[in-house]
Image (cartoon, rainbow, N blue to C red):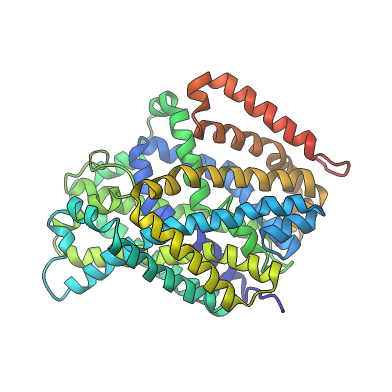
Amino acid sequence: MARETWATRLGFILAAVGSAVGLGNIWRFPWQTAENGGSAFLVVYLGIVLLVGVPGLLGEFVIGRRANKSPVGALRELSGQRSWGFIGMFSVITGISLLSFYSVVGGWIMRYLLESGVSLVGSDPAYFTNPGQYFGGVSAGADAALYHLLFLGLTALIVFAGIRKGIELGTKIMMPAVLVLLGGLAAWAATQPNAAAGYAFFLRFDPSVISENFFAILGPAAGQALFTLSLGAGTMITYASYLGEDRSLPFDGSAIAVLNTSVGVITGLVVFPLLFSQGINPTETGTGPGALFVGLAGAFSQLPAGTLIATAFFAVVTLAALSSSISMLEIPVAFLVDEYDVSRKRAVAGMAGLVAVTGTVCAFEPSIFGFVAGTLVNILLTAGLAAFLLFVGWVMGRDAIEELASGAGSLGRSLSTPWLFAVGIVLPLFLVFTLLTHFGVDGSIGFWRTVGIAVVASAVAFFGLRRPESVV
């Protein structure tokens, strides 16, 4: 069957931004920031986005557009080795893992949105009375599973409609709505009393916090950067596989990174001033996945027109969540369509059915949810991106430079060789080190020994993958 493509360049950019701009920015980013030192986390996070995220994004784009296939077929075809196809299978596993917890959180958000919307014409939302108790009652169990299935159903409907009529059309509507609503909320939050304290928590730079806690911040910041840019799961490989050769990958990648990061920062400019305006310290509201719901629900309950503000906020988060969840479902769907010539209808039904089961497990078991949403996702995304970049640098080699330069103009061509050096050597080394910190190796054997292990492991990978025509 003929493979679909994006109808417009804007459609691709908005779809990729939609994949990146989701719960990673609006749900996960605030509580990760609060857990890891506020502005110190923001500085490290922005550095990783610039130095790791953008080059990594281009690496995934190069693989996808070169092969016009999902990660499994792309790695196998470009390498000529079945073993790389098996490595590509990890992207399918990662996509299913991501959506398994993501749809549960999406279900929470839909519940809060519906509760807020209905309360516009009645009494205050139920979560206003005791936000912590309410969230504790709805975040796990049968209700959480039911809303998970509802959110997953909406996701499946969009993916079922295809690339142009489903994903592209949906994100063309959702992303402008997210930006407009979020910008309006940020402007309104700036007028609230004590908003300056929220800005200080979020934006004031204190070098001592970073110097004293750098390695404690590094792992979460790297995981957040990869999660929010949809890197390491194969999402961007899949989306780029629907691209034409006339697109400038450096331009598109930079635009996506800038828009994505801007949404994360704007969200911080909404959340933290709002919390501080009501005397709520984000470091004291409890950390973890429920922090945003509990802290903001408490703030909304104290505001004039709080129900209206809550409805607008949860509408933003719902749209952002859907724009990301469709990209996660598209990974395994594209795999079935490309590798087994399964119809999109059957592929969507099969994968949605599988995630319905795995997501329900996460909805009923908070311990499993916490492991999947935190440790497992951080490890899978970090390891996945490291594998993709090693593939670009040491398997594709000059082909990667040629693909990056195609449609990129003189500036893109001039940067292609330094970029390949970075994605082939520097970034995999950094990602291997970060992966070791996820496992707590640095805490057990010390920083320099961990660096040594990362260097040795990376060198083994470099020389094992090296081929004569490689340029790195």
> Viewed as shown, does residue 220 lie left or right of 253?
left
Quadrant placement of the C terminus: top right
Residue that extends furthest to the right in the rendered view of this protein? 468
Q: Is residue 296 visible?
A: no
Q: Position of residue 381 (x, y in %)?
A: 55, 47
Out of 273 and 312, give the one closest to the viewer. 312
| Residue at (44% x, 30% y) in the render | 216
Q: Position of residue 329 (x, y in %)?
A: 53, 65
Out of 35 and 201, give the one closest to the viewer. 35
Out of 329 and 67, give the one closest to the viewer. 329
Is 276 drawn above or below residue 337 in the view shown?
above
| Residue at (43% x, 67% y) in the render | 322
Q: How many marks?
A: 0
Is 389 drawn above or below residue 450 in the view shown?
below
Q: Is residue 164 visible?
A: yes
| Residue at (60% x, 37% y) in the render | 431
Is 111 drawn above or below residue 421 in the view shown?
below
| Residue at (41% x, 38% y) in the render | 41
Quadrant placement of the N terminus: bottom right
> Viewed as shown, does residue 312 lie left or right of 374?
left
Q: Position of residue 385 (x, y in %)?
A: 62, 46
Q: Position of residue 379 (x, y in %)?
A: 53, 42
